[in-house]
């Protein structure tokens, strides 16, 4: 196994998109940022130099980091921010992941500019579980804001207002032909007729599930979130923020130009158009002899409309683990911890400049997470009290018809807290996430767990039924993911074995909801041996400079 070194320089640089300019914090002057490329089992050191004007952390999304929460990244969960003019070296330990993953800032909404792909190649002796592709292409989907999104978010949160909405989606940094002032810089992917490409797709958008398609080209999804799938042939995919997909694309169509398009899938309010529904596009362009000037690219007719929930579910319901001899599944069967977690939008009453006001909030089992100024990991490791409590509830405080049309808004009173769930080493955990229509605000919630992948054993519409629904679980080849959407007005069941001791964040990957508290933390206790315990902290960690005087020596 190899060791790789990267330097990430975070700096604000100027970008012009959608007819206006702004400065944006990015890594190594590029959007998306640099690709980390490793072979399964390698270790990577990334020295992050913060030349920006505010504190930042970086998370390696989907990398399990066995026993090494110190380098996981979420601000105030496993570390305090890397302050301007300082640096911190992350040690990223790859174990069983294989395929595409990604990295992104994990503080405020900085990840709008600070993100990039991670490619984990199979080791030479195993290779891909499909014919070796001729080449690869990385496509990162993102969100573009004309304004300074971090400043706007901070202002909005303080005032209890809604968070800002993006002005467009972008494909490898570009909005594409249908957006103002954009058609000169549309991203182009050049292909040779007859070749097969491995498309590595990342949804780095801030708040949107996205449909993605390439005109007249069929997509064969062979992996997701760093695990292999049984090949799924489709003419579009639905990808949630946080998710990554490995897709085979054959360049087998007549020489020409074809649109690649990403379109928001909005399960929340199918009747509104206040999100920008204009498609982000790129162009798949064949090399060879044909007149590019005369060939107008063809638009993908297979791209579902933005409110098409059926297509989204039809696609995600087809995903299955590869589950072959070389890639066995290992689904927990003797469940020792069962949790039933409601995912809700709420209101929370707070004090704004001396006046009692109410603000939008989000919660898990009616608890809306708040960060403290010392991270949970440090507090846990050093036994410091007062920074979190261990009473995150296993069940919602009350049971009612969660998905009824008329759930009373006061059916759940949200409390704010820093409540974590403790798990013993190697516990077998089942979680049922229950979507709710509290506040008439049911929508998909892409839930992400740090430090793990989990098996998605079941999902369905309406309220989870304890008697009948488990009978339909797939315990043979359920897909393995690190991020999965809890369906609008529905439920989703997943399982994992708590074999990675540490402090691991659970959250909705819509930043809008994360900012409002749709998160909690699982602390997995050490096993009995040093090899099953959290590793020693690195010699230096960014100090916590809040009101807390506690720092590492
Ligand atoms: Cu993609 Cu908590 O992160
Ligand atoms: Cu959410």
Image (spheres, rainbow, N blue to C red):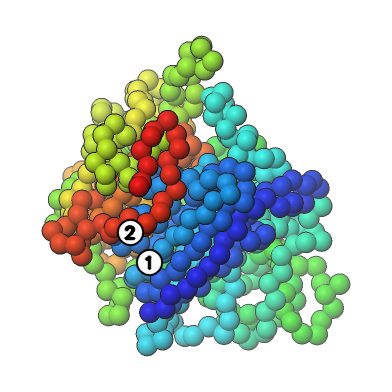
Q: Nearer the viewer, residue 21 or 439?
A: 21
Q: Is residue 429 above or below residue 370?
A: below
Q: Is residue 193 above or below residue 271?
A: below
Q: Hey, which quadrant is residue 1 in on the image?
A: bottom left
On screen, residue 475 versus residue 240, left or right, reads: left
**SS category of the residue bearing label 2:** loop
Q: Image point 70% across, 76% down: which residue?
A: 190
Q: Nearer the viewer, residue 400 or 420?
A: 420
Q: Residue 365's spot in the image, x, y percent? A: 31, 34
Mark 2 surroundings: few (<14), some (14-19) or many (≥20) residues within 10 A = many
Q: Image point 38% across, 34% down: which residue?
A: 549
Q: What distance separates the C-alpha of mark 1 from that of mark 2?
A: 8 Å
Find residue 530 and name its label: none
**SS category of the residue bearing label 1:** strand
Mark 1 surroundings: few (<14), some (14-19) or many (≥20) residues within 10 A = many
Q: Residue 444's spot in the image, x, y percent? A: 45, 44
Q: Image point 32% across, 45% down: which residue?
A: 378
Residue 267 visible at all = no
Q: Is residue 112 above or below residue 230?
A: above
On screen, residue 416 versus residue 421, left or right, reads: right
Tell me which numbered mark, 1 or 2, is placed earlier along the sequence. Answer: 2
Q: Label 1 CB, ligand 1: below 8 Å?
A: no
Q: Hey, which quadrant is residue 405 in on the image?
A: top left
Cβ–Cβ under 8 Å for marks 1 and 2:
yes
Q: Residue 246's spot in the image, x, y percent? A: 49, 70
Q: Residue furthest top?
A: 355
Residue 364 visible at all = yes
Q: Image point 62% across, 43% down: which residue?
A: 53
Check disc 2 and report the residue beneath it. Answer: 68
Check disc 1 and report the residue beneath it. Answer: 93
């Amino acid at each position: 196994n190899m060791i790789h070194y990267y330097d990430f320089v975070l700096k604000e640089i100027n970008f012009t998109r959608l007819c206006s300019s702004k400065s944006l914090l990015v890594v190594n002057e590029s959007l998306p940022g640099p690709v980390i490329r490793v072979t399964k089992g390698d270790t990577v050191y990334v020295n992050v130099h913060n030349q920006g004007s505010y504190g930042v952390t970086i998370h390696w999304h989907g990398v399990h980091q066995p026993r090494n929460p110190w380098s996981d990244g979420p601000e105030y969960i496993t570390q305090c921010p890397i302050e301007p003019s300082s640096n911190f070296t992350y040690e990223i330990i790859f174990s069983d992941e294989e395929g595409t993953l990604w990295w992104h800032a994990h503080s405020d909404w900085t990840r709008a500019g600070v993100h990039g792909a991670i490619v984990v190649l199979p080791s030479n002796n195993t290779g891909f579980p499909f014919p070796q592709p001729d080449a690869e292409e990385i496509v990162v989907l993102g969100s573009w804001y004309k304004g300074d999104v971090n400043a706007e978010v901070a202002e909005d949160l303080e005032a209890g207002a809604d968070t800002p909405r993006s002005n467009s989606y972008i494909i490898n940094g570009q909005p594409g032909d249908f957006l103002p002032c954009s058609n000169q810089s549309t991203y182009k992917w050049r292909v040779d007729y007859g070749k097969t490409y491995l498309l590595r797709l990342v949804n780095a958008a801030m708040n949107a599930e996205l449909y993605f398609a390439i005109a007249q080209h069929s997509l064969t999804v062979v992996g997701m979130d760093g695990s292999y799938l049984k090949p799924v042939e489709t003419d579009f995919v639905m990808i949630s923020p946080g998710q990554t997909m490995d897709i085979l694309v054959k360049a087998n169509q007549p020489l020409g130009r074809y649109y690649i398009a990403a379109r928001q899938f909005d399960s929340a309010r199918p009747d509104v158009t206040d999100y920008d529904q204009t498609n982000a596009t790129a162009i798949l362009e064949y090399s060879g002899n044909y007149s590019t000037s005369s060939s107008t690219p063809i638009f993908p007719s297979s791209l579902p409309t933005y409110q098409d929930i059926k297509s989204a579910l039809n696609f995600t319901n087809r995903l299955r683990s590869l589950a072959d001899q070389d890639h066995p599944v290992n689904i927990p069967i003797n469940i020792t911890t069962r949790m039933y977690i409601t995912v809700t939008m709420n209101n929370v009453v707070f004090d704004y400049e001396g006046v009692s006001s109410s603000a939008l909030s989000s919660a898990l089992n009616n608890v809306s997470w708040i960060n403290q100024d010392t991270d949970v990991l440090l507090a846990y490791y050093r036994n410091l009290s007062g920074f979190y409590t261990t009473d995150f509830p296993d069940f919602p405080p009350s049971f009612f018809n969660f998905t009824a049309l008329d759930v009373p808004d006061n059916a759940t009173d949200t409390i704010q807290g820093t409540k974590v769930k403790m798990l013993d080493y190697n516990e077998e955990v089942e979680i049922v996430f229950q979507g709710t229509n509290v506040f008439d605000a049911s929508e998909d919630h892409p839930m992400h767990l740090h430090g793990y992948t989990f098996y998605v054993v079941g999902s369905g519409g309406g309220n989870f039924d304890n008697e009948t629904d488990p009978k339909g679980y797939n315990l043979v080849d359920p897909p393995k993911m690190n991020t999965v959407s809890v369906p609008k007005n529905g439920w989703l069941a997943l399982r994992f074995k708590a074999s990675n001791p540490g402090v691991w964040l659970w959250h909705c990957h819509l930043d809008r909801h994360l900012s409002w508290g749709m998160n909690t933390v699982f602390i997995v206790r050490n096993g009995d041996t040093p090899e099953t315990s959290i590793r020693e902290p690195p010699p230096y960690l960014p100090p916590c400079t809040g009101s807390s005087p506690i720092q590492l020596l």
